[in-house]
Amino acid sequence: MSENNIKGIMDTTMDKLHAMVDADTIIGTPIVLGDTTLLPVSKVAFGLATGGSDFPSKSGTGLFGGGGGAGVTITPVAFISVTGQSVKMMPIYNDLSTVDKALTMAPELLDKIKELFKKEDKAKIEE
């Protein structure tokens, strides 16, 4: 098989795939709304197939046949909300596993626990 031909197919396929998917695809461009910044988060899945073959020829130079292809799926899954020192994950859809839901809710739960302790400390001071 001609290494130059298959390398050319692979290089072209990878270049096109790289043009579609990069770090900015997963964590999108920040959106600023007043004192809150939203960062879109997406799930990216892709598939890649490349192949080729040499065919014998009477002229002595082999005939090459090949092809390549790639597919990409980009699914928005959440926004990360940053307001001052507070960071929250806001999922877009509820197709999350139990573990994913727990991890998503953890920052909000910690904020609520902090507020509870602040209220208890304030009540003790007022007594």
Image (cartoon, rainbow, N blue to C red):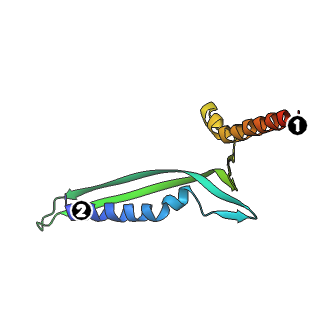
Quadrant (top left, top right, bottom left, bottom right) of the N terminus: bottom left
| Place of residue 102 in the rendered image (x, y in percent of width and height, measured from the top left) | 64, 34
**Residue 35 horizontal side relative to residue 59, left or right:** right
Determine the secondary structure under disc 2: strand
- Whether label 2 touches label 1, CB < 8 Å: no
Residue beneath disc 1: 126
Q: Residues within 10 Å of mark 2 (few under 14, many from 20)?
A: some
Residue beneath disc 2: 64
Q: CA distance from mark 2 to mark 1?
A: 85 Å
**Residue 61 horizontal side relative to residue 121, left or right:** left
- The residue at the point 43 percent across, 60 percent down is 17
Q: Nearer the viewer, residue 11 or 37?
A: 37
Q: Residues within 10 Å of mark 1 (few under 14, many from 20)?
A: few
Residue 112: quarter of image = top right
| Place of residue 119 in the rendered image (x, y in percent of width and height, measured from the top left) | 82, 37
Task: Tell which tag, 2 or 1, sits nearer the viewer.
Answer: 1
| Place of residue 107 in the rendered image (x, y in percent of width and height, measured from the top left) | 66, 41
Is residue 95 visible in this depiction of the protein?
no
- The residue at the point 31 percent across, 54 percent down is 51
Quadrant (top left, top right, bottom left, bottom right) of the C terminus: top right
Query: Going from the N terminus, do you reach mark 2 or mark 1 first?
Result: 2
Residue 66: quarter of image = bottom left
Determine the secondary structure under disc 1: helix
Residue type at mark 1 is Glu
Is residue 56 visible in this depiction of the protein?
yes
